[in-house]
Amino acid sequence: MVRFSAWPTSDIDSDFSHSIDEWRRDPELLNSFGECFRVRPTYARGARMFHKTVQFDDLFISATAASSPLVHDCIPSFAEGGRRFFLLMPNRPRYLDIGAQRVVQRAGECAIADSTIAHTAAYSQPHASICLSIPAATLSHYVPEPDRLVGMRFASDGTLSRLLSMLLLSVWTSAEAGAARGDGRRGADALLRVMACCYARSPSRPAASESAARVSCEQIKQLIDMEIRNPELSVQLIAQRVGVTTRYLQLLFAREQECVSQYIKRERLLGCLLDLRDSDFDHQSITEIAFSWGFNSAAHFSSSFKKEFGLNARDYRACTRGDLEALGATGEEGTLMEAVLLLNHHRTH
């Protein structure tokens, strides 16, 4: 058992059953962290790590400890389960980057992060930390606008903030003892109520417009990249995953002179463009390649490909590279030269 109540790092080496290198390489161990967690290779050689996660109802609580300084990154996630907020507490000071914001988080101090916004924690010494993962829908029952919590720290020298930290520690203790669904759930409810009180009394909450701005075009594109082969991908699905309106998404892309649906279609076409010239896919028909990139109509794919690249997919697949370069050089095929350049770039990198 990792005794977080005493906040040790030197007395629990026996609990570090795997080296950090093993955590970084082993798929099964990585899965215990979740797909969006990454450890940078900045730790001491031979350093070891402990991690445990307990689920109760729709909440997850996890504890992580490392015998070395390190930096870990949480990559933005738009998982099927939806957006989540993280209540984070370390036992040693650390730098915490949430989006473009950097803070120094003190030992025993809680802070809030968002699964759709990248955050990074950097430690200069051995350490341990606790994370309570809360669905956005659950948190919204306690806090009217949970977006405003992102980046907020609950100063460890305040009465309510100290109570919040103690409750988080208590929830972890209950979870580790196997009482998460009873004592842990009651403790989590009390914790979320205290968090709501801290939020209400905070004089420096970000404005709603600032909160919404944190959902950037780049984040949306990361989601699209992850889901691009999903034929169900749509503006509505993206808005639901990110927790914004479809109108907000369209306005966000309009600033870049783009449309969300057009961006999705173009990225799919570029994927098809590369696969059609890749010998690894010679055994697949044009329709099979198109469907593997999320198209669900051969006719729609054919007309879209011709409109985007100025050449139908069958002729494009049959052309030699010299033919394509000649077409692009004469300017006869519109955007085809861009396709050739992209193709050459991927072939040489």
Image (cartoon, rainbow, N blue to C red):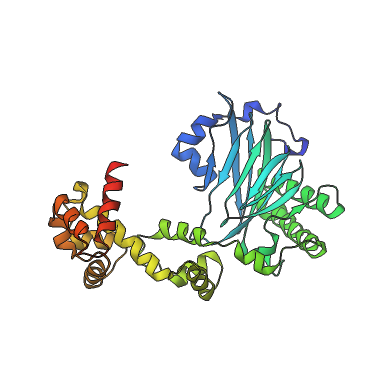
Question: Which residue appears farthest toward the front when viewing the image?
Answer: 330
In the shown orientation, is residue 208 left or right of residue 223?
Answer: right
Residue 216 seen in render: yes
Residue at 46% x, 60% y is: 221
In the shown orientation, is residue 301 left or right of residue 186?
Answer: left
| Pick the front one: 65 or 55 | 65
Residue at 48% x, 71% y is: 254
- Quadrant of the image for the N terminus? top right
Reply above or below: 335 against 43.
below
Residue 141 seen in render: no
Q: Quadrant of residue 127?
A: top right
In the shown orientation, is residue 37 left or right of residue 288?
Answer: right
In the shown orientation, is residue 76 left or right of residue 111?
Answer: left
- Residue 74 drawn at (x, y percent): 56, 47
Q: Quadrant of residue 8?
A: top right
Reply above or below: 287 against 275.
below
Residue at 59% x, 45% y is: 53
